[in-house]
Image: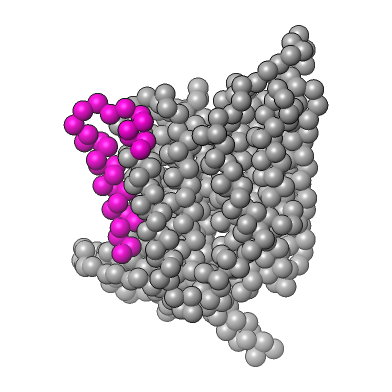
Amino acid sequence: MLSALIFIPLLGALAISLWPTSIAVPLARKISLAVLAVTLGWVVMLASQFNLASSGFQFEQSVAWVETLGLTYRLGIDGLSLPLLAINSLLTLVSVYITSPTLHRPRLYFPLILIINAAVAGAFVSQNLLLFFLFYELELIPLYLLIAIWGGSRRGYAATKFLIYTALSGILILGAFLGLVWLAGNGSFDYSPNLAQTLTLTQQIVLLVALLFGFGIKVPLFPFHTWLPDAHVEASTPISVLLAGVLLKLGTYGLVRFGLQLFPDAWSYLAPWLASWAVVSVLYGSLAAISQQDMKKMVAYSSIGHMGYVLLAAAAATPISILGTVFQMISHGLISGLLFLLVGIVYKTTGTRDLNVLRGLLNPERGLPFTGSLMILGVMASAGIPGMMGFISEFLVFRGSFVAFPTQTLLSMIGSGLTSVYFLLLVNRVFFGRLTVAAPTTTVQKDVMLPPVAWRDRLPALALAAMIVILGLQPNWMARWSENTTIAMNQPYRAIAQAQMSQL
């Protein structure tokens, strides 16, 4: 059943690539949307059959592949991977839907997006370390091409920088996986929480540090973050939605799945340092966002800060904080997807993203009132205003982390306050005041009239906004899928804490 999430998009990509005649953008887009709709429906079907009482992997399948290397085609999902599969299918569908009808080279563009969807789904369901690595690397070249071919004026620089950083990330992760299996004396790379149990603490720490740096590049965490703002600024709007909403989650998923679960002793030893690292990433991302004049770059730096919350919650490793990691990943995917989509609408309508140029876009008659209203909702959700999903995720992160790291949690909460600062600057400059779309030093016509935004562009933003509000008001609709899994993830750390107490 899980293989369908991988092979349906791959077959769709193959069909578009081998289309017998020249394929136009509308047809390629319709095929891609149909394929992704089927994939999303398949995830919904899996969710309907998911056993909420079980904390282990479900829908497992295993096929021998290259036994001499310890590589097996082993799949399974639990409460950590199921929500991420849903956000992957949903946001990929949105990315294809908002693709420009004047796109060039659709025979290449749409298959690349479908390959990324398949690779990310494969990574989330892989229960073999080498298989996860193969899927983790599979999305690298397609995303590089999507930025390098359809990006902005500096797309070559941004794409190459992304490629170098992510390639280094893969090397570190593969090295850690190889070292783990070799030191454990295990001939198989099949995933097991007890895989590192026989290793000494020093060995665990070395392997865990390699994984932390590898996945930290992908998240990204400070100081491995520099590729992300460049990639976002040069990428087209659909690719920015996909990058922020889905691909960054490969890093946070890896931290939780392989760092937190495989190395409980080493993780507990390094946890105070990890919490401090999270604080630095949160505050740096927030302060850097305040200084930006490009709307897209501001949202990109906000992602760095908000991904730091995941590391803080994972470092604490309490039942509530681990649940908070899941909520933060999903809420960030929805909120950042919405914000990048709205920034794209502003850029498409006005031709600029400069905060020094745009004014008064909330004008009800001649501006972009609908876009401005959704932007205000999105920034409120990102700032953690009650009633929206951003509040639930941050509350779980802070509530679960405070018992373990009160100082680091309080410092991270400053980052939440800074989110309100930089997004208030964005909203105040761009959407309020007199409607202008020119630099203050130039002469501006009094009757600026912006073209209305078509409903085709409004619908995906409205859908994401609705989900942010609904899951903010009814968080249990998502929590029930992950709660038992996150409680089970906490058991090794509870045992470590009890052992430490018994020695006092």
Whether 195 is among the magenta residues is no
Indicate left or right for 99 with 340 as reference.
Answer: left
Front in this rendered view, residue 12 or 287? 12
190 or 198: which is nearer to us? Answer: 190
Query: Could you tell me which residue is drawn at 73 percent across and 62 percent down?
Result: 409
Identify the residue at horizontal 57%, vertical 41% (top origin): 461
**Quadrant showing the N terminus:** bottom left
Which quarter shows the C terminus?
bottom right
- Identify the residue at the far right of this view: 433
Q: Quadrant of residue 400?
A: bottom right
Query: Can residue 314 be seen by looking at this rendering?
Result: no
Is residue 36 found left or right of 378 in the rendered image? left
Closer to the camera in the image, 389 or 136: 389
Q: Which residues are magenta?
A: 1-30
On the image, which quarter does residue 270 sit in? bottom right
Question: What secondary structure is the magenta-colored segment mainly?
Answer: helix
| Relative image position of residue 18 (x, y in whole percent) | 21, 36
- Whether residue 95 is visible, yes or no, is yes
Please state the horizontal and vertical placement of residue 93, each as a whole percent of the image.
44, 45
Using residue 415 as the reference point, say whether residue 144 is left or right of it.
left
